[in-house]
Amino acid sequence: MAHSKSDLPRPLRVGPFSWQRLKEFVCDAVALDFPQACRAACISERRYDVWRRFAVEPSPENARMIHVFATITTQPGQREAVLALFNKNRPAVLAETGCISYEAVVDVPDFGGFQTPLGNDTFAVVERWESTEALKAHAASAHMAEYGRNTAPLLAKRAINVLHAV
């Protein structure tokens, strides 16, 4: 689905660029995913330099950014139930200070070739955070504790990788 500048909620005006300002700009653009809305916001302000720096090129400005890859394996047949709980919790996570992106992903069906499938009972969570402090606050939040309590009986295992760009 193609989106245009008119799909965005309001223009981003002059001032220092920050992920928090951009997040506030796209908070009402629920039809757009964050990277797409980020790109559209940067283009609407002719800030190609900002989009390129944060989305494409490693730089000192985003060196503090934290990436999280969590691989979640559910009990047999429970992936959809866990994903429903994930999607219910997602808006609270996206509203947290320092959250850049937070999404669940599953295998592309029948991709073949070089793909190593996660499987029918597994999904991954791909997260980006402004800092380690923001990620630690996220992990300690009440809504994540509740999510953990609700999903614990449905999980077989999980692996969480916390990474940064080099």
Image (cartoon, grey):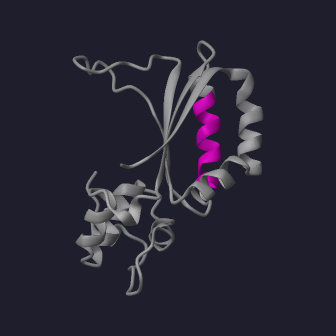
Residue 135 is situated, as x and y percent measured from the top left of the image, at: 60, 52
Decide if residue 8 is on the left or right side of residue 86: left
Residue 64 is situated, as x and y percent measured from the top left of the image, at: 47, 58
The answer to whether 150 is drawn above or below residue 58 in the figure is above
- What residue appears at the point 69 percent right and 22 percent down from the top-left corner? 154
Question: Looking at the rendering, which quadrant does residue 85 occupy?
Answer: top right
- What residue appears at the point 38 percent right and 49 percent down from the top-left corner? 165
Q: Main secondary structure of the magenta part?
A: helix
- What residue appears at the point 76 percent right and 42 percent down from the top-left corner? 145
- What residue appears at the point 51 percent right and 60 percent down from the top-left corner? 130
Whether 116 is among the magenta residues is no
Q: Pick whichever, 87 or 134, lies toward us.
A: 134
The answer to whether 46 is drawn above or below residue 27 in the figure is below
Whether 84 is among the magenta residues is yes
Residue 57 is situated, as x and y percent measured from the top left of the image, at: 27, 58
The answer to whether 76 is drawn above or below residue 83 in the figure is above
Residue 23 is situated, as x and y percent measured from the top left of the image, at: 48, 66
Q: Which residues are magenta?
A: 82-93
Q: Residue furthest bottom?
A: 14
How many numbered marks have been drawn onto this rendered protein structure?
0
The answer to whether 151 is drawn above or below residue 51 in the figure is above
